[in-house]
Image (cartoon, rainbow, N blue to C red):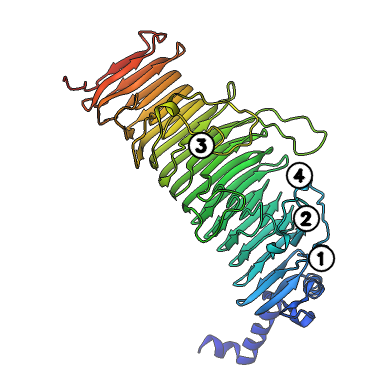
Amino acid sequence: MSPAARVGVPAILCLLLAGALLGAEADFSAVRHGAVGDGKTLCTQAIQKAIDACAAAGGGRVSLPAGTFLSGTIYLKSRVTLALEEGCTLLGSPNLADYPENVPAIRSYTDNYVTRSLIAGEDLERVAVVGRGTIDGNGGAFRRKEYLTRPYVIRLVNCREVLVGGLTLRNSPMWMQHYLACRGVTIRGITVWNHVSYNNDGLDIDGCRDVIISGCRLDSDDDALCLKSTLGLPCENVAVTNCLLSSHCNAFKMGTESNGGFRNITFSNSVITLPVGSKANYGRARGLAGIALEIVDGGRLENVAISSIVIEGVTSPLFMRLGNRARPFQKDMPKPAAGTLRNVKLSAIVATGVSKTGCAIAGLPGHEIEDVSLTDIYLSFQGGGTSDEAARAVPENPEKYPDCTMFGELPAYGLYVRHARGIRLTNVRLATEKGDMRPALVCDDVENLSVDGLEAAWSAGAASMLRFTQVRGATVRGCRPGAPAATFLRLENAATRGVLLMANDFRGVGKVFEAAPDVAEDTLAEQGNLAPAKP
């Protein structure tokens, strides 16, 4: 006898009905509460009534069907899912009065930026905004630079178990979405296009914990995917994967605000390109950094792993900065002490079509960047650097706003490393599209340096392929440079010491090394190298 026959059809129907009543989400239609999808009728109250009714019933789903629904601020409630069906557009009102000010209980530096948003929520749990529909912030109606007059599209503060998925988000007056001091955030499968106004970030995660971002396409004028800490809480336990990022500023960034710091972050299996079909408003046509890691307002950046990233067309593929802007996040607070930046692993990164600027890994005297490894990296630069640029002094700029152009054209066409400790380069290849008179690698005030298997382009007339200044304790091994008229390594400054060249094939260079007059004779040692061929 079948299970159905044993139980009986009426019994099965009862079980199914009970399951529908107890297990399925209740569905509350905003249209049934008065919303009209004509793009002209203001639907704020109708949508809010549906959300409130859903919350009063213990939670469920508030749906918006196909159509264009004009709205001001709507407030999410706990255990409510706002679902935009395919063909639906939630359109932000062009009237600032339709966005009441909301100053959250948790204070942060973003209080200076924005107090309004199209979708708002604070102190909530189990909230979601999902669907195949579109949210359009109508940012063209707020095209002005003044803060506090341009709403976000989504802002959630101190919420738990947040899901945003499947949607298309367009045209914010300000940042597209801001998640502040939230825990358990999942952002998946969203498409963002944000090029209509100033400060058009794609996605900002601020002082949040336990965050997963996957399968997203973010195309923005300002930073595409930005981790921030504009308060005393760190961004920690964040996993970003399988994303496509484009920006006229930075594609993937930690900072600029860094008060609470960043810990336990992964970024993997993603592609970074320059924006196509948009004009730069706030940034520059080709964007700034592909990957930017910045600590300038105190805080700790540590335990970061970035892998399997393809980058094309940016100004600089990699920028790391430990500075000391020291901006407090509230008035009357003391300035924060200089932060720390350490334990960063970058691997399997390919970057092509980037500018001549080069990549900086730059700390400050007495505040070094620590324990950074670059493994299996290929970076191809525009080239064209001059001998004057190779010799130029780079300013410290400790308080300057950080971005990859802050030092000007770097004295290395590839990697410029200053004020750092524990830097390891393994299987790094540096190339140029045209000749460049600058060294491939310049290290200044670096301790405990390891260079293993470096392959670097060299141009006729360049002074050297590598330059070490104030480098203490360095091992260069497994390199096979092909530059028959070049010097492989130049040593400068009396503080340079403890440099070992080991197991390198120098048959393809003109000269292994040269040293400035103030460098001690015993600074460099060689072991197991193949010597240059005699002329």
Residue hosting label 1: 98
Q: Residue at coordinates 60% horizontally, 87% vertically from top-left?
A: 7
State which quadrant residue 390 falls in.
top left
How far apart are the alpha carbons under marks 3 and 4?
A: 27 Å
Task: Check disc 2 and report its element: helix, strand or loop.
Answer: loop
Q: Is residue 311 above or below residue 37?
A: above
Q: Nearer the viewer, mark 3 or mark 4?
A: 4
- Using the image, tell me which numbered label, if any, was put on residue 149: 2
Who comes first in sequence, dot 3 or dot 2? 2
Q: 46 or 157: nearer the eye?
A: 46
Q: Identify residue type, mark 2.
A: Thr
Q: Label 3 neighbourhood size at 10 Å, few (<14), some (14-19), many (20+)?
A: many
Q: Above or below — where is 25 with respect to 300?
A: below
Q: Label 4, on which residue?
A: 108
Please state which of the two labelled residues, at mark 1 or mark 4, is closer to the viewer: 1
| Residue 249 location (% of width, % of height) | 57, 48
- Decide if residue 368 is on the left or right side of residue 26: left
Mark seen at residue 344: 3
Q: Secondary structure at mark 4?
A: loop
Up-down: is 184 above or below 368? below
The amino acid type of the residue labelled 1 equals Asp
First in residue order: circle 4 vs circle 2: 4
Looking at the image, which residue is at 40% across and 15% down?
498
Amino acid type, callout 3: Val
Left/right of residue 220 with respect to residue 440 in the rendered view: right
> Which of marks 4 and 1 precedes in the sequence?
1
- Crowding at dot 4, Cα within 10 Å, few <14 / some 14-19 / many 20+, comes out as many
Q: Secondary structure at mark 3?
A: strand
Measure how far apart labels 4 and 2 are at the Cα level.
18 Å
- Labels 3, 2: front one: 2
Q: Are marks 3 and 4 in contact (CB under 8 Å)?
A: no
